Image (cartoon, rainbow, N blue to C red):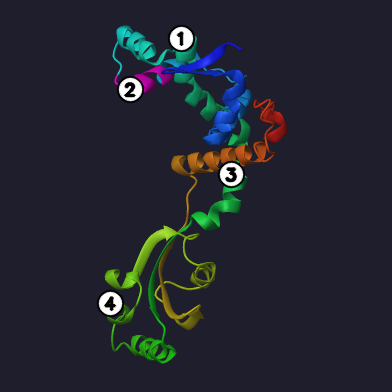
Amino acid sequence: MAPVLQFGDRMIDSNQLVPLLVQYQLLPQLLRELTIDDAIAAVTLTDEERSQAEAQFDEQHQLTSDADHQAWMQQRGISSAQFEQIITRPWRIEKFKLLTWGNRLDSYFLIQKPQYDQVTYSLLRTPDPEIAQELYFRIKAGEQTFAELAREYSQGAEAETEGVIGPVSMSQPHPALAQRLRHSQPGQILPPTRMGEWFVLLRLEAITPAQLDAAMRQKLLDELFEAWITQALSQPPKTTQPALALSAERLA
């Protein structure tokens, strides 16, 4: 059988290629890219989009002329047709995302919004319930500030920031903490609660609601795309035929 790849003195034929991809754990990535190519096969770019794609590629790779393009291709053994695909593929993927899920973003955002809200809160934790209760009363009575006591008594990394954590995504704190924060008012200190080995004092500082701006739209499109890819690749591949014939219509 004729070799399909030569590496130094080593010749690799088609019967060896797939087992090697499996051995080096590269087959999942190949299947992912094949699935994406199948999905974007019908996606085309306008002339303006094509020009923007090339300009972006040239900037990323510091190519300033046709001679630079030729040298880049020659160094990698890439044909002009392959070069065209490399330039346009990222843009076609982004266009596929927008065409497939763009009209769902408003409703999807409403579902996902709670986990993307940003929260800033103060936290103090100690393994001693009596100390936790005493510190709670000191703060309530105004004898000392939360920041002072967190710096002195808290036994987590938050002691270095005087107890303040955030702003962070609402999905980052422990779910039980996030639930308490959502039902708190800014400035309200909550009584000590047990969290595993710790007794925790908690105070909400601020919640900043997520906005469906350009950055959030891109985040949601990426999230939907990755969920689609995961679904598409959920079945174990047949290594004798690695290409997956999966259409965007069936999986979107």
Q: Residues within 10 Å of mark 4 (few under 14, many from 20)?
A: some
Q: Does 61 appear in magenta?
A: yes
> Which element type, helix, strand or loop, lies under badge 2?
helix
Q: Is residue 229 shown left or right of residue 211?
A: right
Please tell me which residue lies in front, 152 or 112. Answer: 152
Residue 189 in sight here: no
Amino acid under disc 4: Arg
Q: Name the N-terminal-most of marks 1 and 2.
A: 2
Asked which secondary structure carries label 4, the reply is helix
Tag 4–tag 1 contact (CB < 8 Å): no
Mark positioned earlier in the residue sequence (4 or 1): 1
> Residue 159 appears at what percent x and percent y?
30, 73
Drawn side of residue 104 relative to residue 184, left or right: right
Per the image, the residue denoted by label 1 is: 79
The residue wearing badge 4 is 151
Residue 11 is situated, as x and y percent measured from the top left of the image, at: 50, 17
Q: Which residue is mark 3?
A: 106
Q: Choose between 13 and 61: the one closer to the eye.
A: 13
Q: Residue at coordinates 52% horizontally, 73% vertically from top-left? A: 180
Instruction: State the separation of the CA atoms marked 4 and 1.
Output: 62 Å
Q: Which comes before the other along the chain, label 1 or label 3? A: 1
Element at label 3 = helix
Residue stretch rendered in magenta on the structure: 53-62
In front: label 1 or label 2: 1
Q: Amino acid at mark 3?
A: Asp
Does the magenta portion include 74? no
Alpha carbon separation for disc pair 3 and 2: 36 Å
Q: Choose the circle earlier in sequence order: 4 or 3.
A: 3
Which one is closest to the eye, mark 2 or mark 4?
A: 2
* Label located before the other in sequence (3 or 2): 2
Estimate how packed mark 2 is, as few (under 14), some (14 to 19) or many (20 or more) residues with alpha carbons within 10 Å.
few
**Label 1 packing within 10 angstroms: few (<14), some (14-19), many (20+):** few
